[in-house]
Amino acid sequence: MPHFFFHIDDGEYCPDRSGVELSGVKAAQAEALRAAGGILSSEHRVFTSSSPWVMSVTDEEDHLLFALRFSVERPGGLDHL
């Protein structure tokens, strides 16, 4: 079974050193969305910065397969939100 790694960068890079075995890229995409949702809902500090929050998913050879990118864009005058 393929091994996938889910690296986080929210202004500080946090590599996934253990990864997880999944059936394929579609399963990795589903896992990335599930994991990102859990992380984002529990870490309110993520959206206090203007820099994006990124989860990069790589294979066991460290090839980038896809990335999820989340950011908050505030129109002018809404910086207080």
Image (cartoon, rainbow, N blue to C red):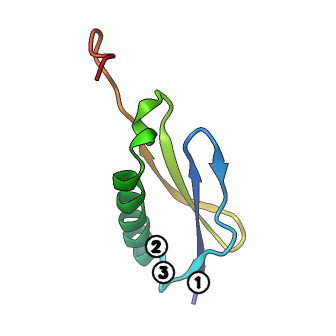
Direction from residue 41 to residue 12 in the image, left or right: right
Q: Which residue is mark 2?
A: 28
Label 2 Cα neighbours within 10 Å, binned few <14 / some 14-19 / many ≥20: many
The amino acid type of the residue labelled 3 equals Gly
- Gap in Å between the C-alphas at discs 2 and 3? 6 Å
Q: On the image, which quarter does residue 38 sit in? A: bottom left
Q: Residue 20: percent from the left, percent from the top?
A: 57, 79
Q: Which quadrant is home to the N terminus?
A: bottom right
Q: Mark 1: few, some, or many residues within 10 Å (few <14, many ≥20)?
A: few
CB of mark 2 within 8 Å of CB of mark 3?
Answer: yes
Measuring 51% from the left and 31% from the top, which residue is drawn there?
51
- In this view of the protein, which residue sits in the foreground, 30 or 47? 47
Q: Are marks 1 and 2 in contact (CB under 8 Å)?
A: yes
- Residue type pointed to by label 2: Ala
Tell me the kind of residue under disc 1: Pro
> According to the image, label 3 marks what residue?
24
The label on residue 2 is 1
From the viewer's perspective, tell me whether residue 6 is left or right of residue 25.
Answer: right
Residues under numbered marks 3 and 1 in contact, where contact means CB atoms less than 8 Å apart:
yes
- Residue 68 spot, x, y in % from top left: 44, 52
Q: What is the residue that sits farthest to the right in this orientation?
A: 61
Relative to residue 8, is residue 47 depicted above or below? above
Mark linked to residue 30: none
The tag earlier along the polypeptide, 1 or 2, is 1
